Image (cartoon, rainbow, N blue to C red):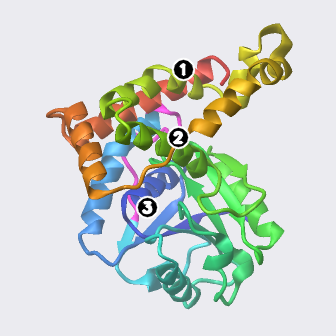
Amino acid sequence: MSVRHVGIMGGGLIGMSWASLFLARGIEVTVVDPRPAAGAELAAFIAAAWPHLRALGLTETETPRQAAFSTDVAALARVDYLQENGPDRIAMKEEIVASLEAVIGPEVVIASSTSSLMASDIQAGARHPERILVAHPMNPPHLVPMVELVAGRLTAPDTVDRAEAFYLQMQRVPIRVKKEVPGHLANRLTSALYREAVHMVAEGIADVGDIDKAIAAGPGMRWALMGPHLIYHLGGGAGGYRHYLDHLGPTQEARWSDLGQSALTEELKAQLVGGVEAEIGSESPEALAERRDAALVALAALKRQHGF
């Protein structure tokens, strides 16, 4: 089934980013958000994102295309694919699904951008649970290509196939997660690292800024090109991954056993926030995000050039 008109439920940061991508790929887009001000925010976001989308080769159109905007879910009645981006609260997801199913056709896929919730829980009270799955991106989804696809207990295999075909059409990199777990795949990996980063601050091992620099100037350089298994395969030299596991596996196990976890007390949260404020200095969040986005575009070009 060809997707020509995508509905976006929730016009926040993720919803606006999705809208920009879909428009760039020539898809008609309707965004619904209960906040009237979200319409102007959407138009401004698309205008700012468009040069990056052109640089990535995702569109050849010079003038940004515009999405339709409404505060009324009935505006989604004609869509043939639905990207849901509501708050990550299961009760709210259930309400959103009910409101969507009251207006969209039974064949329309409902793909949730949820970062932690499971499709089985979201689809539990649905009239057509077979068309619901998780399609979780990394922020910002118009620049970061990964999309995690996770089926629920009642998701039809065809739904996953259709979602995968759609995101490939959007030039994304869909990942099929084989088993439902809270946080899916990528967020569990990043949470594991973040837990230790927070613990190191709590234990006085390093400051926030130095921890961030260590990642950005160290393993993050390699992670932009390949994942941990391939990295350690190269770390094994001529013997590859097998040699690495046999030779250095015990040192990994020793580090695993020493990893920590610290409670996010108010004192620790203040320390973390203070560390970030010191790290960014006077730079505004908008300027920092723009530098990040420009660098992501350049990084994508570099990766293509070198076959990554």
Quick one: SS at disc 2?
A: helix
The alpha-carbon separation of the residues under discs 2 and 1 comes to 26 Å
Is residue 62 part of the magenta span, yes or no? yes
Q: Residue furthest top?
A: 238
Q: Can residue 166 be seen in this view?
A: yes
> Residue 114's quadrant in the figure?
bottom right
Mark 2 vs mark 3, foreground winner is: 2
- Residue at image point 49% right, 40% down: 196
Q: How crowded is mark 3: few (under 14 residues within 10 Å), some or many (20 or more)?
A: many
- Which quadrant of the rendered structure holds the N terminus? bottom right
Circle 1 sits on which residue? 302
Query: Within the image, what quadrant is residue 102 found in?
Result: bottom right
Q: Residue furthest left?
A: 282
The C terminus, quarter of image: top right
Task: Reply above or below: 245 against 273.
Answer: above
Visible residue check, residue 227: no
Q: In the picture shown, does residue 237 fall above or below 132?
A: above
Q: Which residue corresponds to the image point at 55% horizontal and 52% vertical from the top-left?
A: 137
Task: Name the residue type under label 1.
Answer: Leu
- The secondary structure that dominates the magenta segment is loop
Question: Which residue position holds label 2?
Answer: 193
Return the residue at label 3.
15
Between residue 297 and residue 51, name the one nearer to us: 297
Q: How far across and down, in percent of the image, does residue 26 sit?
A: 53, 53
Percent x, y of residue 228:
67, 30
Q: Which residue is drawn at 76% across and 60% down?
A: 179
Is residue 290 placed above or below 304 in the rendered structure?
A: below
The residue range painted magenta reads 55-67
Taking depth in this image into account, of 160 and 116 the one nearest to the observer is 116
Q: Give whichever of 168, 231 is nearer the camera.
A: 231
